[in-house]
Amino acid sequence: DLAKPKAAVGRKDNGLSYRLYSLSEKGEFKEEADPSSFIVKAEEYGVPQARHRMFILGVRSDLNIEPEILEKETAPSVEDVIGTLPKIRSGISKGTDTPERWQKLIKKTVEKAWFKKLGASNDDFALITKEKLNGHTVFPESRSSAVYKKPKKMQSWFEDEHLSVLTGHESRSHMESDIERYLFASTFSLANEISPKLADFPKQILPLHKNVEEGRAGKMFPDRFRVQLPGRVSTTVTSHISKDGHYFIHYDPAQCRSLTVREAARLQTFPDNYHFEGPRTSQYHQVGNAVPPYLAAKIAEIVEDILAGMEDE
């Protein structure tokens, strides 16, 4: 009965006749309730991603049922779920894309005056450069890998014992100028444990955008280049990741790239046996638009309990 459903789950109230419940706070809520009471912060329920969305659970008024709320769970970090995936390099979008050219670009950037100046003024930056980008660094040569590696955490959720290969772990191509920016940003992030703002970028590698100075002043898109820090949950994975990777930079300077479809999928908690169809842009859209499956499963358990209780009504 669409006019008076026995139960409903959605992202906003549609005015039908049922009592309103939150998935994050106990008790019944009136229509004039504070909308923030219905916000579910995915990272508080085991998802390695800061994703805040509104969910309203409705139960028909004549049913004597009060739903449970989601049980809180510590979320794993970015590194916990993507750190074991095979190391791959980014591609170069213009000209010949070879491992030799890519490695030469990385090494050349490290030797530039502005990069050396950062190391001279910041001991941690110099240390990360020495550890990750020294003469003995074995840089990845391939842009993709199908080798299956389990994550450090949530193995029972991600793993499929019948899975022998992994799909979706293929890097994008970037302009040389963006590769330089990614190299700086990832090194800066490991050294300072924060992602750099535009104000932190050396002027030599600032993008040639009209509003870049507003960004440096913190007025407009100051964090347009965002590194996903290894020891924290990620920022919200959105469909915008399909357009460019600037907001989803991998934390490892030796890989110097944006996240792959599979890495984004792990942050969204898609099981490793989930295969994304279509071109890569479409695959990123599928990942970014989804409710994290791990969270969806928890919500489904609550709804299942409601349906079971309805049978007794």
Image (spheres, rainbow, N blue to C red):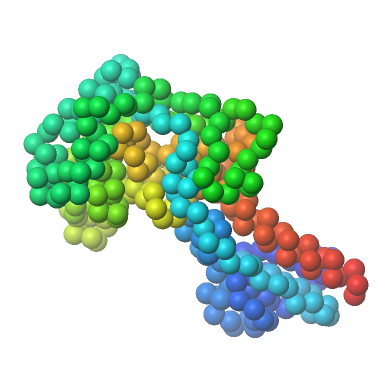
Question: Residue at 63% of width from left, 51% of height from top?
Answer: 293
Residue 197: where, in percent of width, then height?
A: 25, 54
Taking the image as shown, residue 78 lies to the left or right of residue 132, namely right
Nearer-the-camera pick, 292 or 211: 292
Residue 224: where, in percent of width, then height?
A: 31, 49
Location of residue 174 by image quarter = top left
Q: Quadrant of the C terminus?
A: bottom right
Relative to 175, residue 201 above or below? below
Q: How many marks?
A: 0
Question: Residue at 26% of width from left, 24% of height from top?
Answer: 103
Quick one: which residue is furthest to the right in this view? 312
Relative to 173, residue 299 above or below? below
Is residue 285 at all visible to an observer of this figure? no
Location of residue 181 by image quarter = top left
Taking the image as shown, residue 15 lies to the left or right of residue 202, namely right
Question: Residue at 19% of width from left, 59% of height from top?
Answer: 217
Nearer-the-camera pick, 145 or 63: 145
Residue 82: where, in percent of width, then height?
A: 47, 42
Q: Quadrant of the N terminus?
A: bottom right
Is residue 220 at all visible to an observer of this figure? yes
Relative to 143, residue 298 above or below? below
Location of residue 166 by image quarter = top right
Residue 282: where, in percent of width, then height?
A: 54, 36
Question: Residue at 39% of width from left, 49% of height from top?
Answer: 230
Taking the image as shown, residue 76 lies to the left or right of residue 136, namely right
Nearer-the-camera pick, 281 or 296: 296
